[in-house]
Amino acid sequence: MDGLTFGTTVLVALVVFVIIILAKGIRIIQQSEVMIIERLGRYHKTLHSGINVIIPIIDQPRAILWRYSQEVPGGGVIVRHISKERIDLRETVYDFPKQNVITRDNIVTEINALIYFQIMDPVRSVYEISNLPQAIEKLTQTSLRNVIGDLDLDETLTSRDTINSRLREILDEATNKWGVKVNRVELQDINPPRDIRDAMEKQMRAERDKRATILEAEGAKQSQILYAEGEMEAQIKRAEGSKRSQILEAEGQAEARIAVANAEAAAIERVTAALSAGKTDPAQYLIAVHYLDSLKDIASGEDNKTIYIPYEATAALGSLGAIKGIFEKKDE
């Protein structure tokens, strides 16, 4: 009975051992993950997503060191390095802590950066570099110092896209040997010293005040120009109106004179026809009529000096009549 119990125990242990071995030999890999397998210490193959079978004990997965950052209450960040058997092929982001860099004009500035990279060749990422996260971090820091050292502070603050592009090119070229592709590099914060920030704020306020003054002067100038243009247009319109009015008035007077002349011509023609029928000189008739009209106008005033000129004066210049009013005015 004891022998049967011992045999059963051995059989059960053997079955459990076989199950464990089989479990160790079956590996299920998730999508976008791979596993590097070494056989007796040498690279054997790469396991891709799905079910894979290996020989336990003989085949062993090669671990890779990975970097994780975790935010803690209070705004801090804890960085942990974990050794894992599975290599993630998805794009990964590393948030590096702030570091002090010196610009070309010798100003110490705090800068932190983000780097987005992706493992393209898992074999090289395992065998070409011992500590991939640390290598990427140190390479990013040194490259950032070199790039910022070639720029002034103003260029650093205004040329983020240029800095990001240069960093990405440098890091992508350097990490290509490790089977890593750097997709993007982003500068998060650029913090100059406090006194520099105060000076920059004063400069910005001065620039804003300057722009405001310039805009106000430009507005006043434009207003005066528009006002002057309006006055000029108004004067031109008034001059054109006055010109048009004078032209119309002159045309009216000319037409009136023409009408009067036509009427007088018609009257003269009729008078001439009538006088010719009575054998009377038309010229003498017209002179007599105008002479009588002139006498009427001369005599209409109270203080007028009246001169009587006989109608026959045209024939006898010696017969001049003395004017009574002249002598009366003289005596007074």
Image: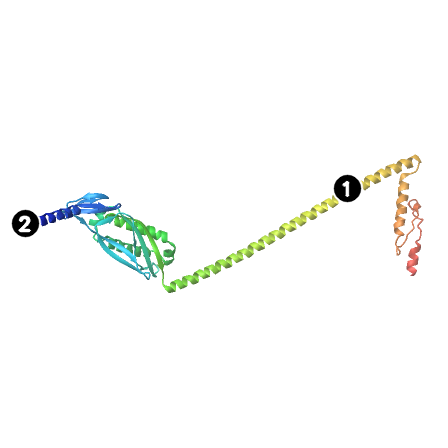
Side (left or right) of 214 relative to 308: left
Q: How is the image coloured?
A: rainbow
Residue that label 2 marks? 3
Residue 77 versus residue 56 in the image, above or below: below
Residue at position x 36%, y 53% from top? Answer: 160
The image shows residue 297 at horizontal and vertical percentages of 88, 50
Of callouts 2 and 1, the N-terminal one: 2
Quarter location, residue 137? bottom left
Residue at position x 79%, y 42% from top? Answer: 257
Residue at position x 65%, y 49% from top? Answer: 236
Which amino acid type is shown beneath numbered disc 1? Answer: Glu
- Can you see residue 15? yes
Residue that label 1 marks? 255
The image shows residue 285 at horizontal and vertical percentages of 90, 41
Side (left or right) of 202 relative to 253: left
Which amino acid type is shown beneath numbered disc 2? Answer: Gly
Q: CA distance from mark 2 to mark 1?
A: 155 Å
Is disc 1 placed on a helix, strand or loop?
Answer: helix
Q: Nearer the viewer, residue 147 or 251?
A: 147
Q: Nearer the viewer, residue 60 or 2?
A: 2
Disc 1 residue crowd, few under 14, some 14–19, many 20+, Cα 10 Å: few
- Can you see residue 40? no
Residue at position x 84%, y 38% from top? Answer: 266
